[in-house]
Amino acid sequence: MGTLQASLDTITQQSKTTMPMNAFTVLENSIASLQQTGIANGLAVGDKARDFTLTNANGNQVNLYEELTKGPIILTFYRGSWCPYCNRQLRAYEEILPDIKNIGGSLIAISPQTPDNSLTIKEKNDLSYEVVSDLKGLTAAKYNVLFDVPPEVKEVYDKFGLDISEYNGGGNWLIPVPSTFMIDETSRIRFSYVNPNYMQRLEPEDLLTALRNL
């Protein structure tokens, strides 16, 4: 079985063949800029996880600290249902969900999009774990992974008919850096993966290894 990154690289290659090179260069430059500025580099291992109560895809409330009473939580921030890389990552994590549960953990995926769009990605990818809506990105901001899509990237997305503000339902273009935090029952972050390059994601096997190490 191939790695998650191999399938993500395929998406990237397809994008390069269907997208004007200057547009793809803008996206690459925006990634480099985000890496250099470090404005969304996430909470560190050992930090206390920020509590939240957010609405899931079915309209129910999910509270982090309450979920932690049942065992460790894998909290993964994704950009939205419009992102093919996110869809592939979330499907890959669904595939290892039985292993996560066997170890005693659970998974929560979080994005700034509306509950309706969270339901769309949940149904589209047949996800059985919690998918919650972080409207206005307030929780992502608490975890220091939120940033505003720069104007030049917004212009590229506009040309392809992608309106992130419509997905978010609040007129904003705020999205998180794709990131995954592993939180133990004492609410401490024990593992952190934050990568401004949205074309790369934490491998499922690496996630499982980190969870076993708890």
Image (cartoon, rainbow, N blue to C red):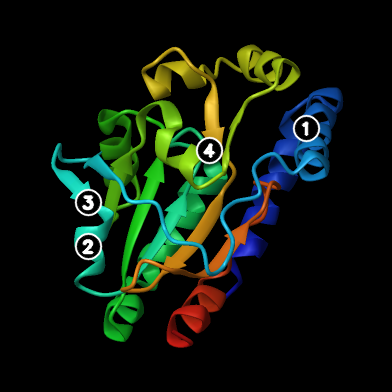
**What residue is pinned by disc 1?**
30
Left of 48 or right of it: where is 68? Answer: left
| Quadrant the C terminus occupies | bottom left
For the residues labelled 2 and 3, the Cα–Cα distance comes to 6 Å
Residue occupying the point 54% across, 19% down = 162
For the residues labelled 1 and 3, the Cα–Cα distance comes to 33 Å
Residue 67, label in figure: 2
Does label 2 or label 1 sit earlier along the sequence? 1
Does label 1 or label 3 sit earlier along the sequence? 1
Residue occupying the point 54% across, 21% down = 173
Marks 2 & 3, CB-CB < 8 Å contact: yes
Residue 83, label in figure: 4
- Amino acid type of the residue that numbered disc 2 sits on in the rendered structure: Glu
Does label 4 or label 1 sit earlier along the sequence? 1
Q: Residues within 10 Å of mark 1 (few under 14, many from 20)?
A: some
- Amino acid type of the residue that numbered disc 1 sits on in the rendered structure: Ser
**What residue is pinned by disc 3?**
63
Label 3, secondary structure: give it: strand
For the residues labelled 2 and 1, the Cα–Cα distance comes to 35 Å
Residue occupying the point 35% across, 50% down = 125
Q: Where is residue 198? Give x, y as percent.
A: 65, 46
Circle nearer the viewer, 4 or 1:
1
For the residues labelled 4 and 1, the Cα–Cα distance comes to 16 Å
Circle nearer the viewer, 4 or 3:
3
Label 4, secondary structure: give it: loop
Circle nearer the viewer, 2 or 4:
2
Residue closer to the observer: 60 or 128: 60
